Amino acid sequence: MREGFGPEERPLSGAPASGRRRWTAGLLAKDRPWLNGALFVLTLGSAYVVGLSWSASYLFVDRIAPDPALRAGGWMLRDPRVIGLSAAYAAALMAILLAHELGHYWTCRRNGLSATLPFFIPAPTLIGTLGAFIKIRTPISRKRVLFDVGIAGPLAGFALAVPALAAGLAWSKVVPSLPREESILFGEPLLLKLLSAFLVENPGPGHDLVLHPVAFAGWVGVLITALNLFPVGQLDGGHIAYAALGPKSRPLARFVLILFLILAAVFWAGWLIWFFLLLLLRVDHPRIADEEAPLGRGRTALAWAAFLIFVLSFIPAPVKAYNLLELIRMLGR
């Protein structure tokens, strides 16, 4: 998720803003709790609707596995157990997203910065949302404040994603392998593999792990944490890297941009979208006044903790689908 950090978000004095930027700036200029609340409810609803399908697939996987032609029909979606599991998925996912954004929000408030309440984005995606964001309206000029605001969200979201993933793994199912062409396969972060070693019986060859909806919400939370911790531009990881490394963070950001192309070519073509998105949003972090000020031992230790969280959360191929090399080979046939 992206947060605004001061003047770089606004057009230069005297430069005409586009109609879209003027509309967005006007929308965020004043607090509108009713809008934040409405978007929260709509996103909760979209997550619930998407969760119905995941919940039905989890609950009736024993029927679907031997008969791939069987789909989550109306009778499945009306099952009270499916309704309850979908509500659990939506609640867990929204709690993780809300914790992440409130981590930023309350850190801003504690440091006297003006910030909006979280704006959630409902969408019929695989997870039921496009995430959430806050807008910070006060320019940040101190490195330690920048660091605190940047790291607060990932720490808060990760703190809820881990127990959701752990609890959900304990309720997940091991089933005979599903036909690959009939199922969506998700990548496994290192954290999931470590927790599975303690909480899940080893599936062995010829078997798959079907995540409980709460575990899937935890998986989404872990993925969101990793995406936000990339040390680029105004992502949370960009704030942390700039506060910890200063100007040295700029070569790191460019390396990560190249890394997205490599990931897209070898693992998952979807990384190409992130490559262009980050190019659009700005690769280098804007400079602040006390760029050379020391960060301090405590915050430096937290920066290393954020790096460890990124390693545990990162998924080279979130969805096991075609990479760019495979797509090029297919087009060349």
Image: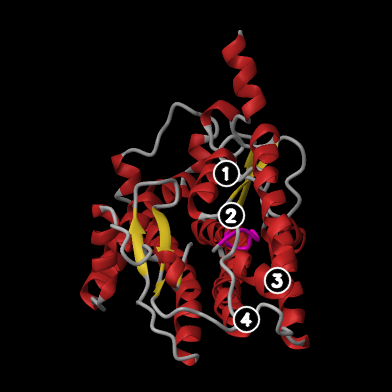
- Residue 9 as seen in the image, left or right of residue 173: left
Q: Residue at x 64, y 58 (%)?
A: 230
User: 169 or 108, which lies in front?
Assistant: 108
Q: Which residue is mark 2?
A: 283
Looking at the image, is mark 1 or mark 2 nearer the viewer? 2
The answer to whether the residue labelled 2 contacts the one labelled 4, judged by CB atoms less than 8 Å apart, is no
Q: Residues within 10 Å of mark 4 (few under 14, many from 20)?
A: many
Q: Is residue 37 magenta?
A: no
Q: Of callouts 3 and 1, which one flags the residue occurring earlier in the amino acid sequence?
A: 3
Q: Secondary structure at mark 1?
A: helix
Mark 4 element type: helix
- Residue 275 is tagged as 1
Badge 3: how crowded within 10 Å, few (<14), some, or many (20+)?
Answer: many
Q: Which of the two discs, 4 and 1, labels the residue nearer the N terminus? A: 4
Q: Amino acid at mark 1?
A: Phe
Q: Which residue is the site of mark 3? A: 246
Q: Tell me which label, 3 or 4, sits earlier in the chain.
A: 4
Q: Secondary structure at mark 3?
A: helix
Of badges 3 and 1, the one in the foreground is: 3
Residue 27: in sight, yes or no?
A: yes
| Residue at mark 4 | 143
Q: CA distance from mark 2 to mark 4?
A: 18 Å
Q: CA distance from mark 1 to mark 2?
A: 10 Å
SS majority, magenta: loop
